[in-house]
Amino acid sequence: MTFAIYPSLAGRNVFISGGATGIGADLVRAFARNRAHVAFVDVQRQEGEAMAAAVKSEGGTALFLNCDVTDVSALQARIAEARAKLGPIAVLVNNAANDERHAVADVTAEYWDHAQNVNLRHHFFAAQAVHPQMRELGFGSIINLSSIAWRGAAEMPAYAAAKAGIIGLTNALARAFGSDNIRVNAIEPGAVMTDRQRRLWYKTPESIDAIVQRQSIRTTLLGEDIARMALFLGADDSRMVTKQSIIVDAGLR
């Protein structure tokens, strides 16, 4: 297969949360290969530094900044640092999340609050922080990673609630930022088989195949497939696309 390259992304500054591993790492690689200048944050320092080094070895631009996105002040500081080192951010990808499974009976108030902080709250504050930079540029694209889990995932209700909240936040910010020529969209990934998913939830070929057989397109869904949708939403090719939530799940039902 041959995939698109987006000339409008060349030289643009992109900020990605949770970019060290999983879908986030695929996002970092995809934007860097489109010649964007990528800054990304992650709580995993060793993995983040390795990712940045790998991108640079391929001739790309990647700035890793260690950060826990649940610390809003630290996240705001990292966004400011990315702007100081690279310039105004044109594309924001809010990706960081934790899809930890949990039973309804086991959820405490503290667990609930943490789930919202790691899966939802940082989306708002990152968007708030980049808004002036995009307004200065005269354009921008914010891409929020939701999940099809919000449509009914009994084994992770706090996560599902946060991912549903991302859809509402996306719609609200698209209206709030539209007059500044800033687009806000969401992506809802399906069962993406990252290393983490294979290590924690889908440990055997049989369990992966069981998911694939529930898809209309019976091919394993990868982080690269999510990244390609993010590239389109970040590029000028989608200049009139905003306030949308796009499902990328191979037709999982």
Image (cartoon, grey):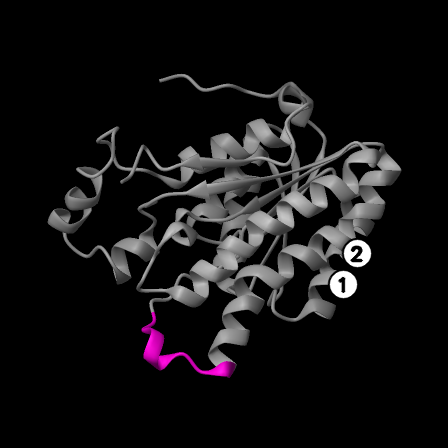
The correct choice, above or below, for 63 with respect to 99 in the image is above
* Callout 2 touching callout 1 (CB < 8 Å): yes
Q: Nearer the viewer, residue 43 or 169?
A: 169
Snapshot quadrant of residue 33: top right
Q: Residue at x 31, y 62 (%)?
A: 154
Give the SS element for disc 2: helix
The correct choice, above or below, for 63 with respect to 135 in the image is below
Kindly report the distance in space between the C-alpha atoms of the residues bearing marks 2 and 1.
5 Å
Q: Residue at x 57, y 41 (%)?
A: 56
The correct choice, above or below, for 251 with respect to 46 in the image is above
Give the SS element for disc 1: helix
Q: Would you name the residue on which mark 1 appears? A: 77
Q: Nearer the viewer, residue 195 or 231?
A: 231
Give the percent coordinates (x, y) of residue 24.
49, 48
**Magenta extent:** 102-109
Q: Residue at x 44, y 36 (%)?
A: 247
Query: Alpha-carbon neighbours of circle 2 within 10 Å: few (<14), some, or many (≥20)?
Result: some
Give the percent coordinates (x, y) of residue 249.
36, 37
Q: Amino acid at mark 2?
A: Ala
Q: Residue 44 got which mark?
A: none
